[in-house]
Image (cartoon, rainbow, N blue to C red):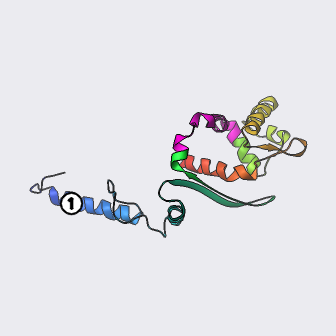
Amino acid sequence: MPSPESPDAAAYADLAERVRRLEERLGGQPSGSGSGPGPDSETFWILAGLEERHGPRAVAYAGSLEVDHGPVRWQVTHDTDQVLDQDWTALAPGLSALGHPARLRILQLVARGEATAAADLADTPGLGSTGQIYHHLRQLTGAGWLRATTRGHHEVPAERLVPLLVILGASTA
């Protein structure tokens, strides 16, 4: 920070004020500030409700969508300390099942209802041979991301659909 006598002091003060106003408009607290106004409850309505119910040490995800077999509504809240303290390595199988481009494409096709059977998927370029597709289906089913239904068809279980979308949405941020 420039000294108060510095010719740049006024420019620095102006810049600091502009950054503070921008952060305030975005609903956040100024950098390095532990006090001051909280997030804007109109912009951060989910966060405001979360903190009201669970305090400042919680994470949550929720979603609502329509699928062929009806509406899916899902909401989960976790205490952040419990998430930070759990064995993250135990999550590896479920997460690693999502770590292959062909599996992500299969999940996308199944979730959108465009392809639900291995025969449908075999016609999709880039997914590999029928044997490879069956391998990917086994991986996804074993990790709980897919469920086998009738006659070799698959679906994303309703209880996994919103978490899947949250993981994918968070990956784009």
Q: Residue at left 68%, top 41%?
A: 104
Q: Residue at left 68%, top 36%?
A: 97
Which residue occupies the extreme right position in the image?
A: 151
Q: How many numbered markers are drawn?
A: 1
Element at label 1: helix
Residue 95: x percent and y percent? 63, 38
Identify the residue under disc 1: 13
Query: Main SS of the magenta segment?
Result: helix
Classify residue 16 by image quadrant. Answer: bottom left
Which residue occupies the extreme bottom position in the image?
A: 42
Residue 50: x percent and y percent? 53, 61
Q: Residue at left 76%, top 43%?
A: 146
- Dot 1 crowding, Cα within 10 Å, few <14, some 14–19, many 20+: some
Q: Residue at left 11%, top 54%?
A: 6
103 vs 30, nearest the viewer = 30
Residue 23: x percent and y percent? 37, 61
Residue 102: x percent and y percent? 70, 37
49 vs 105, nearest the viewer = 49
Q: Which residues are magenta?
A: 83-104
